[in-house]
Amino acid sequence: MDCMKVLDRLGRPLTSLRLSVTDRCNLRCQYCMPEQDYVWLPRADILTFEEIDTLVDVFTGVGVDRVRITGGEPLLRKNLPDLIALLARKTAIEDLALTTNGILLADQLEALRAAGLPRITVSLDTLHADRFKALTRFDSLDVVLRGLELATSAGFDSVKIDTVVIRAVNDDELVPILALGQRLGAEVRFIEYMDVGGATRWSMQDVVSRQEMLRRLSAHFGPISAVDEDTAAPADRFTLPDGTVFGIISSTTEPFCRQCDRSRVTADGLWYRCLYARTGTDLRGPLRSGVGADGLREIVATTWQARDDRGAEDRLATKDRSPLIPVETLLDEPHLEMHTRGG
Ligand code: SAM
Ligand code: SF4
Ligand code: SF4
């Protein structure tokens, strides 16, 4: 089958898909899941691997060639390596990766590699055990560090570290986290704290901007230069004087919506064209009621062609920014949560 490429109303192609395989998580990061109680997606709604397989073919049929497995915590999904093996065999996917909090990484590393997973990103916000516990509610820094360290010698094409930077929480750890990345050969990406659904404690005062991160890093390392590359990847990449490359994802203060080619499917098959979108498109319903691949491709293509989302740019233009969605609304509609959308 020929792949048809579709463009949205701003001329953006659909090339990147984030695939959430569960809404459950074994951490409670303060910037993502700070509440005591959550409403989970009904188990019967969670897509089977066969259904995910069909949907991925639909998306690659309209131009997707990058797939990232996420969650919640994707390593909580039973038999995940079976899904990875399925996806790794698809020649239409040029870039297959997984984002994990690292808690179960050491246990599953061998199976993930054997299944053919080429790239992995580990989220790690602090190197202090007490901070890790305060940030995530679990005393598990050692476990994550062990998983990360083992991952860097497991033969992946790349291992990355993603760090959400929050003022007065971990903004004094930019240098040590970069040093860890250097030691392990893992590229670090600093992420500005975002006011996404689920970040119910978010405040603009807690955001450390890309400009501020660069200022602080150059005060320590010397002149930093931007890597010259023309990609839709959300990280702007930079080089330290010693050649170390790192990224900064500045969705909050310098959004990149104009180049955004990504969308996300939740574990129960809702498709969102923007991290900030209030509504998504149900693909599970048509899939389970027998709409075939051609029909699904048509739904995806026409919906993408109507897309004009620029969520982070809209937020930037909002006066007096405060958390995007109130807790009561999140309890009513868990699809608005970052941990359901997959980041
Ligand atoms: N549980 C996995 C993990 O943490 O790596 C995968 C899912 S998590 C939702 C994906 C990414 O979203 C993580 O790197 C996390 O740090 C990031 N994230 C969650 N809430 C965020 C927020 N409010 N601002 C910026 N990044 C956030
Ligand atoms: Fe933290 Fe990821 Fe879980 Fe959110 S989904 S609470 S970022 S580990
Ligand atoms: Fe893309 Fe929406 Fe994020 Fe902008 S806010 S970069 S449109 S997902």
Image: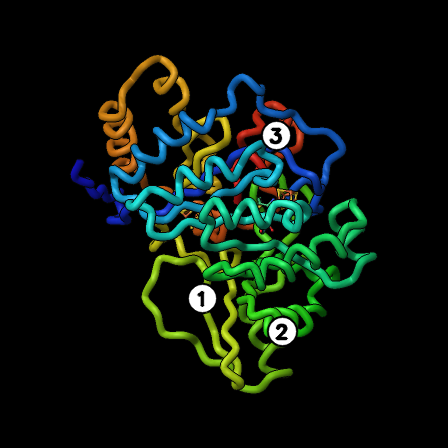
Left or right, 108 with respect to 170, comes to left
Inter-mark Cα distance, 3 to 1: 31 Å
Q: Which residue is mark 3?
A: 330
Asked if the residues shown at circle 2 and circle 1 are in contact, with their CB atoms under 8 angstroms apart, the answer is no
Depth check: give the residue in front, 166 or 313.
166
Of tags 3 and 1, the one toward the viewer is 1
**Residue drawn at x 41%, y 30% as measured from the top left:** 52
Q: Position of residue 115 (x, y in %)?
A: 47, 44
Q: Position of residue 230 (x, y in %)?
A: 32, 66
User: How many other residues sit within 10 Å of disc 3, few (<14), some (14-19) or many (≥20)?
Assistant: some
Looking at the rendered image, the quarter that the N terminus falls into is: top left
Secondary structure beneath dot 2 equals helix
Q: Which residue is mark 2?
A: 183
User: How many other residues sit within 10 Å of disc 2, few (<14), some (14-19) or many (≥20)?
Assistant: few
Q: Amino acid at mark 2?
A: Arg
Q: Amino acid at mark 3?
A: Leu
Secondary structure beneath dot 3 equals helix
Q: Is mark 3 within 8 Å of ligand 1?
A: no
Q: Residue most toward the top?
A: 289
Residue 205 seen by the camera: no
Q: Position of residue 155 (x, y in %)?
A: 51, 60
Residue 182 appears in which quarter of the rendering?
bottom right
Depth check: give the residue in front, 201 or 337.
337
Q: Amino acid at mark 1?
A: Asp
Q: Which residue is mark 1?
A: 236
Secondary structure beneath dot 1 equals strand
Question: Is tag 2's residue or tag 1's residue first in the polypeptide sequence?
Answer: 2
Q: Position of residue 113 (x, y in %)?
A: 51, 50
Question: Is tag 3's residue or tag 2's residue first in the polypeptide sequence?
Answer: 2
**Residue drawn at x 39%, y 27% as measured from the top left:** 281
**Residue drawn at x 56%, y 66% as measured from the top left:** 186
